[in-house]
Structure formats: structure tokens, C-alpha cells
Amino acid sequence: MIGATIADNTDGTLYTDQTGAFPVVSYKGNKIMFVAYEYRSNAIIAKPIRSNSDESLVAAFKEVYEYLSDKGFKPKLNLVNPDDHRVNAAERAIQTWKNHFLAGLNTIDPNCPVQLWDEFVNQGMITLNLLRASRVNPKLSAYAQLEGQFNFDRTPMAPVGTKSLIFLDPNKRRSYQNHALDAWYVGPAMNHYRNYRFWLPDTHGFRTGSTAKFFPAHCKMPAIEPGDTIRLAAQDLIQAIQNRNKHAPIDLMPKHTEALRQLVEIFKDTTAAGEVQSTPAPRVSAPSSSIDATNPERLRNQPRIHSRVTRRNTPMPTVMEETFEAEELENESTANKENENPNNNSTLPRVQAAPR
């Protein structure tokens, strides 16, 4: 991991530090991360890069430099001793970033390929900067200082590495094909409205979709309880009865109106009682279900998602439907060859030699 601190408080300094490579090479070939810390906005910026070569470092630095310049935080540079850690302000920024990134990485699904870690960087950077206050305006977050207010309704997010089902459009699926595809959530689609980014195991490609169902492994999806549904319906009924239009097409009889008023009073008491009650906290906290995503033993046993087969690289398992189709095609081709060549010796049973 490469660290850089861009500080422009007084004279402007740039601190760099190298802390090591990521345990796994990503699906796109990235090995380390370039981390930049901008002092005035208090923002931490991370960029995955392929290596610590001069070409990769210069490209990442130019990208961060141009990004900060476009946002109005053009840094000034000043070289310092690379071995002097006392004046290297990047140490704290890198430690903060690694702690935040590992916290999110350890909550991915146990079956999610860790080689997608470079796709998780964008969401980790967003969530981290949303928690940090800007030095220019402490009432704004570091993300808001650079990008503006983050709108969760426009750009929804989910836990990274979550198993998902994404809807397959009827115009793009075959007859009797499943209506959804298995995928892994990798981050928000920043340039699309209410969309997510996924990685598909069957195609080894990325896809942007808006209709999806998530299956988190370490938490439960928020759901409305039956009692809350009843209270919400009661509140809607109260509002509809109290604000009923005089020119409504339905004319209620006096006895019906009285019955509804009594029902409104009952619902008022019920909703008021439900709002006061609160669920007590459990005396014993639930055990943690997080995983050690960067454990070397776990990484050795996890299947790779590259297409090549080597001694240390096993590709992802093939989809069962594709395996069955391949076997059927192979059997059909074998049967056709036997029908064309009835005297073929390859179809005769082999005689095994007697053991010595």
C-alpha cells in the first residue's frame, strides 16, 4: 500500500509511505493501494494500482492531483525524508483507511471472492469520508466538502460482498430461463439513478442494475413488523376519516360514521401505546459472524476467479445448468458418431489385463 498526505494548511507538504502489498492480487490485476490525505478537507482518497513502479505511482498521483485541483483544493508539494516517520502525517491516514477498509472487508459473504477487493474501495472511501468532518467547515463532512451532499435515495448502497439476485429483463432472457441472475454486490453506481454495481460469476463481468434482492450473511434486512403495519394503516385511516372530502362519491350513513369514529379512537390509543413501547436491549450481545478475509490459510483454500488453471489457481465452479447442457451435447455427439460408424472399435469394451 502506498501512502501520500497532501497538506496545504500553511506551506503545503506531500508525504509518501509504502506499507506493503495486498495479500491477494485483484481480478483486474491490482496489488497495492495509493492513499492520499488532503489536510483542509480532511478527506482520505484511495486508488488501487498494479504495482509500486514509477509509472503506476505517477499515474495515481496525477489522478489524485487533478481531482483535488478540480474540487478547488490544489495542493503544493514539498519533499521530506522518506525514513522520517515523525513528520509523516500519512501514517495516521493510512492506518485509519486500513482499519475502515478491513472492517468492511471482514463482513463480506464467506463465499464472495476476495479478489474483488479493489471494487470495494470506492464505497469504503465514500463511507469513510462521510464520517470525517471537514476542517474548512466543521459542519460538513469531508465527502460533502469535495463532492457535495450525498443523497442515499439517489445512490443507494448495501454491504459490499453481499450475495444478490438481479432481475433479468424479459427481452434479454430465453424461454424458461430464470428471471434473476446470481451476483455479488461490489458498490454503488455513481453515474446512474438508484442503481447498483454487481459482479456476475457466470460471465465474470460487471453489470449495473436497479432491481435486486440482497441476502446479507451477517445482518438481517430491515423489514416492517406486523404491528408497525397495523399502526401505519390505522394512521392512514385516521387521516382519511378526519380529512374526508364533503363532495366524496361515497356517502356514509350516520351509524357507519359513528362506528368509524369509535374505531379511530381505538386506533389512536393503540398507536400511542405502540410509540411509547420500546424493545429492551439484549443482556448478552450476539456473537460476531465476521470473517478474517485476509487470513492466508483462508485465501489458500478459496477458489480463484481467473480463467486460467494453474497449480495455485482453480477457476470458479461452472454453473450446473451449463454442465448439464455440455454433457447432453457430448452424449448426443457420441451417439451420432456410433450410428454413423457401427463397426467402430472404440465402442467395444476394453479387455483388462490380468493382474500379475
Image (cartoon, rainbow, N blue to C red):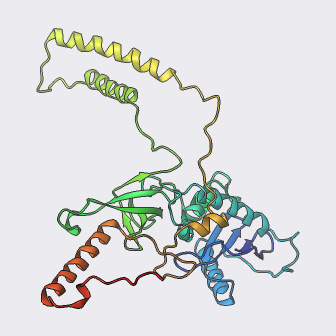
The answer to whether residue 174 is seen in the rendering is yes
Q: Locate residue 76 relative to residue 318 in the image: left or right.
A: right
- Residue 223 percent location from the top left of the image: 41, 39
Q: Is residue 37 shown above or below 143?
A: below
Q: Nearer the viewer, residue 260 or 176?
A: 176
The answer to whether residue 42 is seen in the rendering is no
Name the residue at 33% across, 24% down. 234
Name the residue at 17% across, 65% down. 175
In the rendered image, which quarter is residue 5 located in? Answer: bottom right
- Residue 198 percent location from the top left of the image: 42, 65
- Residue 148 percent location from the top left of the image: 54, 60
Name the residue at 69% across, 83% down. 52
Q: Locate residue 202 relative to residue 287 in the image: left or right.
A: left
Q: Nearer the viewer, residue 327 or 296?
A: 327
Q: Nearer the viewer, residue 135 or 325?
A: 325
Q: Nearer the viewer, residue 238 or 44?
A: 44
Q: Is residue 247 shown above or below 202?
A: above
Q: Locate residue 352 relative to residue 54 in the image: left or right.
A: left
Q: Is residue 186 shown above or below 309?
A: above
Q: Locate residue 28 relative to residue 271 in the image: left or right.
A: right
